[in-house]
Amino acid sequence: MAFLWFILIGIAAGWLAGQIMKGGGFGLVGDLIVGVIGALLGGFLFGLLGLSATGLLGSLITATVGSMVLIAGLRLMKK
């Protein structure tokens, strides 16, 4: 069941990050990939800063922030 929540949060975070970063969504699979990688990246970054987020909302925020950092980094590499 935890894996299902991880996937759903990844999809939501990827879509939300795409909307915030003005890049639009990346489709279901793209949002999932961006969201899952962003969740891992966000967890790593929050750990470095000594922050922790708990619960469903905390996980969504962490994954969204990580996804936004991922999108920004990909855009920098693309240029």
Image: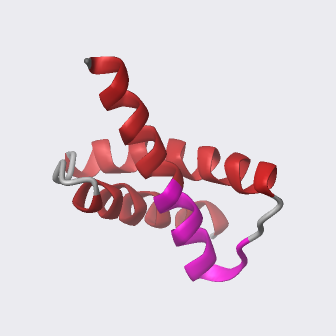
Name the residue: 20% across, 48% down. 27
Q: Is residue 78 left or right of residue 49?
A: left
Can you say whether 1 is above or below 15 in the image?
below
Figure quadrant of residue 73: top left
Name the residue: 42% across, 50% down. 68
Residue 5, percent across and down?
A: 55, 69
Q: Which corner quadrant holds the C terminus?
A: top left
Q: Is residue 54 magenta?
A: yes
Residue 25, percent across and down?
A: 20, 53
Q: Is residue 54 left or right of residue 10?
A: right
Q: Is residue 22 left or right of residue 21?
A: left
Q: Is residue 61 magenta?
A: yes
Magenta region's main secondary structure?
A: helix
Name the residue: 72% across, 78% down. 54
The one of 2 and 37 positioned closer to us in this rendering: 37
Count of residue discs:
0
Furthest residue in direction right, as rendered:
50
Residue 32, percent across and down?
A: 38, 49
Q: How is the image coloured?
A: secondary structure
Range covered by the magenta-colored residues: 53-65
Residue 52, percent across and down?
A: 77, 69
Q: Which corner quadrant holds the N terminus?
A: bottom right
Name the residue: 60% across, 70% down. 59
